[in-house]
Amino acid sequence: MDFNEEEFVQRLVFLRQTFRNMSQREIGRALQINGYSDIEGMRKRCHCENLLKLCRFYDVTADWLLTGDPTTLKESVRQLIDREVMRQVRRTTSISKVAI
């Protein structure tokens, strides 16, 4: 899998909102990453040292964060993501039923 900056940022946002429920400012402060919102806004590239901080913070591999390769995910994170996907599917399904 190749690196795609937009997809990398989508994974960062997903992790931040789903598993930490923190603002960009809170993540930046917690990890001591100046301009974290600029990384999510694709105005600034993520340096290697910050990538390592993010991987440790979210307990994911750099391979997954950079490429989205699911085979590199740790089992605990994979299970959390599976649960979140199922929750979103259920919510979407219940919304669809209400619309019908």
Image (tube, rainbow, N blue to C red):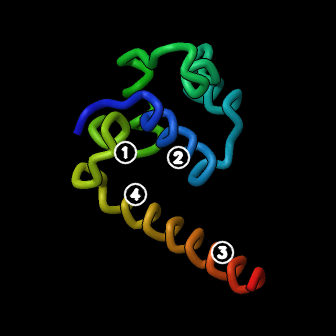
Q: Quick one: label 3 or label 1, which is nearer the N terminus? A: 1
Residues at circles 1 and 4 in contact by the CB criterion of under 8 Å? yes
Say if 93 sits above or below 46 in the image. Answer: below
Asked where in the image residue 30 lies, by quadrant, the reply is top right
Q: Position of residue 5 (x, y in %)?
A: 42, 28
Say which residue label 1 marks.
60
Q: Quick one: label 1 or label 2, which is nearer the N terminus? A: 2
Say which residue label 4 marks.
77
Kind of residue at badge 1: Val
Q: Quick one: label 1 or label 4, which is nearer the N terminus? A: 1
The quarter of the rendered structure image containing the C terminus is: bottom right
Is 53 positioned to the left or the right of 66 in the image?
A: right
Asked where in the image residue 48 lies, by quadrant, the reply is top left
Dot 4: what SS? helix
Say which residue label 2 marks.
15
Q: CA distance from mark 1 to mark 2?
A: 10 Å
Q: CA distance from mark 2 to mark 4?
A: 10 Å
The quarter of the rendered structure image containing the N terminus is: top left
Kind of residue at badge 2: Leu
Q: CA distance from mark 3 to mark 1?
A: 26 Å
Kind of residue at badge 3: Arg
Say which residue label 3 marks.
91
